[in-house]
């Protein structure tokens, strides 16, 4: 029997889901029951075939490590980091790795549009092969108060901005993930405003830490980690690091992310890690390392203040944390 052991910072989903996103209690309960039943079934034959397809860019890995970015802790073991994941499209607990294999990631394109010189749609394999791939060791801090340390492979987000050629009037980047209810069962439920959306400022996007991830642990990224393309902002809470991107839009209007739209009292636009600003329902003063189970103090900006603090020096009136 599978026993769910909740940590002291975890809460029941009934508390986490805002009431206003329910379209009806009856449809929610029936949909959730179908979701739970389907989550235990084997992958359909077509989904299994998709899961078994080789990654066309696998020959590029491992990539050279950028030694500038160092850790103050050991790397999280791969087996743990790749099996303890949030990807709400595929389930509401951390064991979504198997369900995520149903996502077809080839063919895959990314649309670059909005306030740009010329809108374009790029093939993911062409994009990956033209970019300067490197490995970076980053800490990652979840808003749920757990953390890990990961060797990400990918390229600076600034390179994607350079490729898109945004107009000078563009101030923000709006990012959008896939919408495919056929393979992502939670997208069939009226819980959240799908597809998943997140955003950042242009200044944040071109900061040297902002990273477009294509791989992990010296291999192409697995689907549960947001293959074939995701973002990592290591100084922000993990929900800002949107997975499986299909669209990047440059705009002069501040984007509203999925979690901000669903629970604006608890999740905001900036979401920078700060131990002194608690989530409305739990403290952020410490975090649990999922590799060791040990608790350690949370670091301001997740320890990356030297790289990013200047981004916020003139924003005293903004709610920068959460």
Image: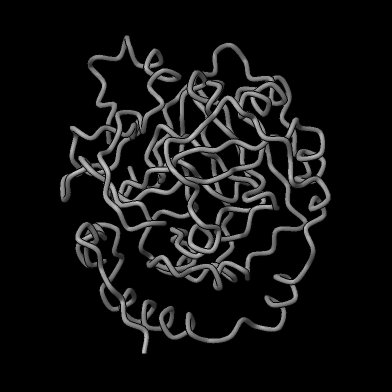
Q: Relative to the observer, which residue lies in front, 98 or 275?
A: 275
Write the residue at 65% across / 41% down.
153
Q: Quadrant of the N terminus?
A: bottom left
For this orientation, the residue located farthest to the bottom is 1
Write the residue at 70% across / 58% down.
105
Residue 298 falls left or right of residue 304: left
Q: Position of residue 117 (x, y in %)?
A: 71, 19
Residue 149 falls left or right of residue 287: right
Q: Relative to the observer, which residue lies in front, 65 or 209?
A: 65
Residue 120 falls left or right of residue 168: right
Figure coloring: one colour
Write the residue at 72% across / 25% down.
163
* Residue 198 versus residue 163 in the image, above or below: below
**Residue 67, image quadrant:** top right
Q: Quadrant of the C terminus?
A: top left
* Residue 21 versus residue 44 in the image, above or below: above
Q: Position of residue 17 (x, y in %)?
A: 26, 60
Q: Position of residue 289 (x, y in %)?
A: 35, 52
Q: Relative to the observer, which residue lies in front, 206 or 108?
A: 206
* Residue 170 versus residue 185 in the image, above or below: above
Question: How many numbered marks have been drawn onto this rendered protein structure?
Answer: 0
Q: Position of residue 95 (x, y in %)?
A: 45, 70
* Residue 255 versus residue 242 in the image, above or below: above
């Amino acid at each position: 029997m599978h026993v769910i052991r909740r940590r002291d910072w975890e809460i029941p989903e009934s508390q986490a889901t805002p009431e206003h996103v329910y379209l009806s209690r009856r449809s929610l309960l029936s949909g959730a029951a179908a979701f739970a039943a389907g989550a235990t079934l084997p992958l359909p034959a077509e989904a299994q075939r998709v899961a078994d397809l080789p990654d066309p860019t696998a020959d590029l890995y491992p990539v050279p490590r950028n030694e500038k970015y160092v850790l103050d802790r050991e790397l999280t073991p791969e087996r743990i980091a790749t099996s303890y994941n949030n990807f709400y499209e595929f389930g509401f607990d951390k064991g979504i790795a198997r369900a995520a294999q149903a996502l077809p990631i080839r063919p895959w394109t990314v649309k670059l549009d909005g306030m740009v010189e010329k809108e374009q749609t790029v093939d993911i394999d062409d994009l990956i092969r033209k970019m300067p791939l490197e490995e970076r060791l980053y800490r990652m801090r979840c808003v749920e108060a757990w953390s890990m340390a990961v060797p990400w492979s990918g390229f600076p987000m600034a390179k994607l901005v350079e490729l898109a050629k945004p107009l000078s009037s563009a101030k923000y980047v709006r990012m959008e993930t896939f919408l495919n209810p056929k393979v992502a069962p939670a997208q069939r439920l009226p819980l959240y405003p799908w597809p998943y959306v997140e955003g950042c400022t242009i200044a944040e996007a071109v900061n040297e830490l902002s990273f477009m991830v294509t791989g992990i642990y010296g291999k192409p990224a697995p689907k549960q980690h947001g293959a074939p393309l995701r973002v990592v902002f290591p100084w922000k809470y993990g929900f800002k690091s949107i997975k499986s991107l299909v669209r990047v839009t440059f705009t002069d209007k501040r984007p509203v992310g999925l979690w901000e739209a669903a629970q604006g009292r608890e999740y905001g636009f900036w979401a920078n890690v700060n131990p002194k600003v608690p989530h409305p329902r739990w403290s952020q003063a410490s975090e649990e390392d999922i590799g060791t189970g040990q608790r350690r103090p949370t670091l301001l900006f997740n320890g990356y203040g030297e790289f990013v603090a200047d981004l916020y020096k003139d924003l005293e009136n903004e709610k920068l944390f959460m």
